[in-house]
């Protein structure tokens, strides 16, 4: 079994994509990083600044950048060399839509229900009024992941808007012959770079125009580039990439200030964290395929990686709910109260995400795979190589 097929079963005659343990571990770390950033915000809000976590926890927001790089890598790794055609493009897009929307609807619906029960409207009425947007329209666009002036009803959903855009364009690329896809990727990157050079977008993609030209799209493309280079290089640059990725990540941690929310932040984080994570993803996957590194990754970390999408979507809801119950009973004036909150909130977020994965997310993915095979592969016994882990 060669370099590529060690962790990937080919489209012709294969059964399904095998799990890349390093990718799952990175997903777990990305979700934990975002969780820590939001834990700091919630803890700080309820404890008058007497926090266990420091403001440095806000660098955990970079977990989003890692998720974007991983998405680009996985899409090219599993589908970049599929034969051109509408059926493969349709199969790919169906798999991604089924991956994103049902779990999003579950947690966005939970947030809307909470807002309705607590405040009488299924959206943030103050925000809707301040921005001058229609409440029903805001809710509809939130559930459909359409960019508009307000953040989605569950705020972390802004990242899914970028994911859906990337998947749509990638599906269009699958209509092209394989030899045209890499040049199309490069052209896509050039368009984004040109937009960055004249600052055509702001700090948030609030329209289709700004979404198409948003700097952080480059992170998906960096991940895709890492996959293409890995396929062609056989991982020969894994150790230089690992060292370079670690050095670049240290520089990013020092240079990017996530407390600044000005219009330059998306560009700054893209060029700081994007290359660092792309190098690390390339290196770790290559090392996993050429050594026994994958066996050293704890199964618990891989399992949390399986839950990472549910964890990412549910954690803000869960830790906010824990805070509303916890802090009225504890003064949060000492280290032990706050530490207890962090431990309880983290455990609760993990519990809810695991429950959501096993009771909802995984059954939905299994049903979606069956539907996809029925609708797109009725005369083709080889299923589309998208794993429920991806």
Image (tube, grey):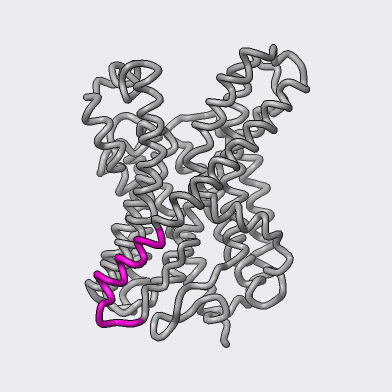
What residue occupies the far front of the structure in this picture? 359
What's the residue at 56%, 19% (across, down)?
324
The residue that appears at 26% across and 30% down in the rendered structure is 138
Instruction: Tell me which segment is drawn in magenta.
Output: 365-381
Q: Nearer the viewer, residue 93 or 159?
A: 93
In the displayed structure, 295 sits above or below 35; it is below
Q: Is residue 284 above or below residue 127?
A: below
The percent position of residue 117, horizontal first and vertical second, equals 37, 20
Q: In which quarter of the image is residue 3?
A: bottom right
**Secondary structure mostly taken by the magenta-highlighted segment of the chain:** helix
Total labels drawn: 0
97 and 70: which one is in front?
97
Q: Where is residue 237 in the image (x, y as percent from the top left)?
A: 63, 73
In magenta segment, residue 377: yes
Left or right, 30 with reference to 270: right
Give x and y (percent) for residue 65: 51, 48
In screen coordinates, is 167 left or right of 38? Answer: left
Is residue 375 toward the left or the right of residue 153 in the image? left
Q: Is residue 270 visible?
A: no
Tell me residue 297's x, y (percent): 70, 62
Which quadrant of the rendered structure holds the N terminus?
bottom right
Q: Is residue 10 above or below residue 276?
A: below
Q: Nearer the viewer, residue 73 or 25?
A: 25
Q: Which residue: 67% across, 78% down?
A: 290
Residue 337 on the magenta span: no
In the rendered image, is residue 370 in sight? yes
């Amino acid at each position: 079994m060669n370099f590529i097929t060690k962790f990937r079963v080919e489209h012709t005659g294969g059964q399904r994509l095998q799990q890349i343990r390093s990718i799952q571990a990175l997903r777990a770390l990305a979700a934990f990083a975002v969780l820590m950033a939001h834990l700091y915000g919630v803890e700080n809000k309820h404890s008058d600044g007497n926090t266990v976590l420091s403001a440095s926890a806000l660098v955990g927001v970079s977990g989003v950048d890692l998720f974007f790089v991983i998405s680009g890598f996985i899409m090219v790794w599993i589908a970049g060399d599929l034969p051109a055609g509408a059926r493969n493009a349709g199969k790919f897009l169906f798999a991604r839509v089924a991956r994103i929307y049902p779990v999003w609807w579950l947690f966005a619906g939970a947030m809307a229900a909470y807002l309705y029960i607590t405040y009488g409207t299924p959206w943030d009425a103050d925000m809707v009024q301040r921005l001058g947007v229609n409440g029903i329209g805001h809710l509809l666009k939130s559930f459909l992941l359409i960019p508009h002036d307000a953040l989605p009803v569950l705020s972390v959903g802004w990242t899914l808007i970028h994911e859906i855009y990337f998947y749509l364009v990638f599906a269009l690329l699958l209509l092209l012959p394989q030899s045209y896809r890499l040049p199309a990727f490069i052209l896509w990157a050039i368009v984004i770079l040109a937009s960055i050079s004249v600052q055509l977008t702001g700090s948030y993609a609030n329209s289709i125009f700004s979404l198409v030209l948003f700097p952080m799209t480059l992170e998906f493309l960096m991940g895709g580039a890492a996959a293409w280079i890995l396929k062609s290089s056989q991982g020969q640059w894994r150790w230089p990439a690992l060292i370079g990725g670690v050095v670049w990540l240290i520089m990013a941690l020092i240079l990017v200030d996530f407390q600044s929310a000005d219009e330059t932040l998306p560009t700054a984080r893209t060029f700081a964290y994007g290359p660092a994570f792309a190098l690390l993803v390339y290196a770790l996957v290559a090392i996993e395929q050429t050594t026994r590194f994958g066996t050293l990754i704890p199964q618990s970390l891989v399992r949390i990686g399986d839950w990472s999408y549910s964890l990412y979507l549910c954690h803000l809801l869960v830790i906010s709910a824990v805070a509303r119950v916890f802090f009225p009973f504890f003064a949060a004036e000492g280290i032990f109260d706050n530490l207890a909150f962090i431990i309880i909130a983290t455990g609760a977020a993990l519990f809810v995400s695991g429950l959501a994965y096993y009771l909802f997310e995984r059954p939905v993915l299994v049903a979606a795979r069956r539907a996809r095979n029925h609708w797109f592969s009725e005369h083709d016994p080889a299923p589309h190589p998208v794993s429920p882990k991806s």
